[in-house]
Structures are given as C-alpha cells and as structure tokens.
Amino acid sequence: MAEIKWIKITTNMFDDEKIKLIDAMPERDTIHYIWIRLLVQAGKTNAHGYIFLNENVPYTDEMLATIFNRPLNSVRLALQTLSNFGMIQVQEDKLIQIVNWEKHQNVEGMDKVREQNRLRKQKQRAKKKQLTDSCPIDEEEVSRDSNVTVTEQKKIEKKIKNKKEDIDIDIDEDKDINKNHHHNYNNFSDIAIKLEKCGFGISSPNIVAKLAADVEIYGLEWVLEAIEVSDTKGVHNYSFVKTILENWKNKGKWDESKNKKEEVESNGASNELEKQGIGLKF
C-alpha cells in the first residue's frame, strides 16, 4: 500500500455535534485523543479507511491500548462511544473502519503518492531490462575477439559480473516490493469502490484481497465486470463473483449477442449456490 505521511483534518471539526456531545463526557479528553489516533492510524494503513495490522490480522483492544499508550478500559470506552455515534464501524471480524473516510482524507494527495510509487517501480524495471540487454552484448564481444589480452578479458568479465550483480539487486528489490505490496493498492481501491457502488456494502479487506488476487488470474476489467453482473442478478457474495469469473475462463466470455446463454448459466450457478448454502454475504 502506498505510504501516506499526512491526513486532512478540518479546522471546524470541533463544531460537529458529535464532538460537542463527547465534550460533555467525563472521559472526553481520552476519547478525543483516541479518535485522532484512529484517523492517523487509518492514514498509515491507507486502505479505504480500514485500520488493521495487516490484511489478515485486525487490531485488538489490547493492541490499540499498547500502541496508543492508554489504559485498556479507556480504549474500550472510546471505541464503544465512537461506534455508537457512527464515527467508526467495528465489524464482526474486529476490523475497524472510519466512517466517511473521504472527509478526513486528501484524495488528491493519495493519488499523487500512488503515482510516485508506480513511476519508481517502472524506472526499476526499465533499469533491469537495460542491464539485462547489455550483458549478452559484452559477452559476445569477449568470445568473438580472440586477440583480447588476459587483463582486458578480466576487466570485461568483472564488468559483466558487476552488471549481473546490479540486476540481482534490482530483482531482489522487486521481490521485496511484491512481498510488501502483494495486492496492488490501485486494484485494492478500485475493487473496494466498485463493491460499494454495486450494493455489496462495506466490504471486508479479506474479501477485497481475494478479488485483488483474482486480478492476477482474470484481469482487473473482468473482476470489476463480474461484480457488476453479480449485482444485476441481485447476488452479493464472493462465491458468485468467483463462479462468474471461472465460467468466463472455462467457457469463454460471451459478447452481448450471447448474453442469454451466459445469464442462464449464471442464474443456474446462483441457484445451486443458494441451495448448498455456499457463499458469505458481505
């Protein structure tokens, strides 16, 4: 995920009615502090307002108490209060999401960070390709020129070795990037937004991560279109979206003139899933 160094906070945030109600509480200072810390933590996570240690490990109350350096009971009181006021949403899997995150986030700035990351990775790949292309040329020149002295040949071999080491370094860097950013944030964000627009509700990052992984198999365009097809049929679960993608891959993706056949197959798959009780609603 792209790294964000700042978040947007409006100067009139303390004029909000919910903030004023919190001001009347005995623990107001603690609740205000934890609210700001949650906003900052969501900015660090940079995942559509979600707050988690990683995509599979949500923060527990105890973990937040340690991170925020506040008593556990105070953290629990603040989370309950913010949840009751509709400022955060705590899901069944304990994932926390800031409600209306866009109000507290500089979208333009986030786009800029993502673009910088994309250009950096593009530059790394270009450098790796350039070094890879240049190495065979030097090796061919060494083998072709039978009059090269031993000293000159060693210099050339050293140059080739250094270039290969540079390539290995770039490859390792790319591996680290892929490890740390296994689910491309652009795909993650696009999928989360599409799910909300298509009536899936606020989606768990685990489900979004599964669909982001499916992008590697089916492509982003297919995944987004499968979400739309699932919505048009009134089915809002991951299993049905996955079934659509597998049908397209195995039987071919139908054009508009053949939609009737695809619709019959998709509806049949939907009915079968419902009979078997397969699929977790978002």
Image (spheres, helix red, strand yellow):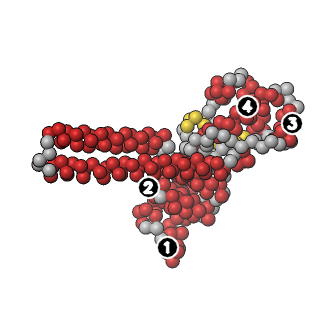
Q: CA distance from mark 1 to mark 3?
A: 56 Å
Q: State the quadrant of the N terminus.
A: top right
Question: Which SS class for mark 1?
Answer: loop
User: Residue 239 appears at what percent x and percent y?
Assistant: 53, 53
User: Residue 262 appears at what percent x and percent y?
Assistant: 50, 69
Q: CA distance from mark 2 to mark 1?
A: 20 Å
| Residue found 52% across the figure and 61% down from its top | 221
**What residue sits right under mark 1 in the picture?**
255
Q: Is residue 275 visible?
A: no
> Front-most of 280 and 202?
202
Q: Nearer the viewer, mark 4 or mark 2?
A: 4
User: Residue 139 appears at what percent x and percent y?
Assistant: 21, 48
| Residue found 19% across the figure and 39% down from its top | 154
Q: CA distance from mark 3 to mark 4?
A: 16 Å
> Front-most of 248 and 179?
179
* The disc label shown at residue 217, or none: 2
Residue at the farthest bottom position: 257
Q: Quadrant of residue 9?
A: top right
**What residue sits right under mark 3 in the picture?**
21
* The disc label shown at residue 164, or none: none
Q: CA distance from mark 4 to mark 2?
A: 41 Å
- The amino acid type of the residue labelled 2 equals Ile
Q: Sequence order check: which comes first, mark 4 or mark 2?
A: 4
Question: In screen coordinates, is 7 left or right of 228?
Answer: right
**What residue sits right under mark 4 in the picture?**
34
Residue at the farthest left position: 146
- The amino acid type of the residue labelled 1 equals Asp
Up/down of 195 relative to 253, above or below: above
Q: Sequence order check: which comes first, mark 4 or mark 1?
A: 4
Q: Sequence order check: which comes first, mark 3 or mark 4?
A: 3
